[in-house]
Amino acid sequence: MSTERIFNPRSRKVLRKHIGPAEALSSALVLTALALVVGWVALNPHDPASRDLDHRLLATGEPEKTLYRPPPVPWTDPAAPAMGAGAGAAGGGVDMAPFPMALLAGGWTPGGRVRGFGPDNLYEKINGEAEKFIRQDFRALHYLVLKGPGGAELSIELFDQGSLPGSLGVFSDHRTPDKQVKLLAQPGPEPRPAGMYFPTSGGGIGMAGRYFFRLAGTPATEDTSAKALQVMTALAGLAGNDPGPLLYRVLTGPLGISPAGLDYVRDNVFQYDFAREFWFGSRAPEKPGAAAPPPGAGSRWFLHQAENPAAAQALRDRLLTEGEMEYESLRQQENMSILRHRYLGTHMALGLGGRFICGVENAAAERGLEGELRKCFQALARMNAGQPETGHE
């Protein structure tokens, strides 16, 4: 039989012939530590009787004080009204500000304190979305969870965007053509910001005044959806009586646009990086619960207010120059242009008046566009001068 080694026919070679003092010292320290551990265990045997509680104590209730640590509870102000003694009692002693107490209707209670976030730590709550809100002048986020009968929960994110354009800009980012926007309140006799929303599964997304809000109910049932609508209606009251910016009042007043048909685009308007801060308005029903058409469906107004007449004229001229590839000019005057899209056949009217730009896009026909622009600039001149509005024209 052959004695040849199959796997490694070569003999072993000792490559290390010296062990350094550092390695020897570390080995000795490890062995010493192990010896001390073994010695300590040998000299300290476990005695169950010295550590376990006497079974006779179980009848006295004393072990509960030793073994059980009650969980922390939210701190409440001792000076707050007691249960049943007013608004503070309705929230169980929890400070609800800035949320209205009407949110607690129907037996709902706060699930904890209101948490607040600012521009510096907004990412802690909505990481990945923070920049979308900050670029729209975000001020603060207030977060609250409501607990309802049967274990239902409703989480509420209330964003303070500082102004109506900021909240409407965020709302415009959230709405898509398949979302049917509804009014939360009928606009009053004077043009003013009105709440609007679109429902989601068990919740909703809406805005009112400078506030934007998102609600999510768990579980997503008809009850949580109804509660979400009640909460959004209450949040719409936060808008107060602020009439809103001039262009908002023009659109919702003489031009007859429902708040549910408005959009505000801060950047990259018409996909031009130089065009910023435009208001858009599509005609929509003005009844609570009535659905508005999706943004961009059919003809719609667009309005812009520049810093001065020179800036407005420069922007108008650049819009006309950049649009030459897509639009052909049908009629050109000093302060008004009527254009037709080369491929779609739709019409656009673009007008300039002082520091204002008014326009209508996606119109089916040229007829009447000049009159529409004239009506827009007349309303702007009248309302900018502080004259009272006479109603829809």
Image (spheres, helix red, strand yellow):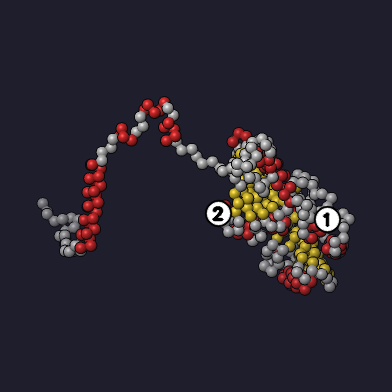
* Place of residue 34 in the rendered image (x, y in percent of width and height, measured from the top left): 24, 49
Q: Which amino acid does label 1 sit on?
A: Gly
- Looking at the image, the residue that sits furthest to the left is 1
Q: In this view, does 202 lie to the left or right of 7?
A: right
Q: In which quarter of the image is residue 124?
A: bottom right
Give the structural element (helix, strand or loop) at label 1: loop
* Place of residue 292 in the rendered image (x, y in percent of width and height, measured from the top left): 75, 50
Tag shown at residue 124 = 2
- In this rendering, the answer to whether 134 lies above or below 213 is below
- Looking at the image, the residue that sits furthest to the front is 79
Q: How far apart are marks 2 and 1 (CA)?
A: 40 Å
Give the structural element (helix, strand or loop) at label 2: helix
**Which residue appears at 72% of the width and 70% of the height?**
322
Res. 116 in view: yes
Q: Which amino acid does label 2 sit on?
A: Glu
- In this rendering, the answer to whether 61 lies above or below 219 is above
* Place of residue 137 in the rendered image (x, y in percent of width and height, measured from the top left): 66, 60
**Which residue appears at 62% of the width and 39% of the height?**
92
- Disc 1 target residue: 253
Q: How crowded is mark 1: few (under 14 residues within 10 Å), some or many (20 or more)?
A: many
Res. 316 in view: no
- In this rendering, the answer to whether 182 lies above or below 11 is above
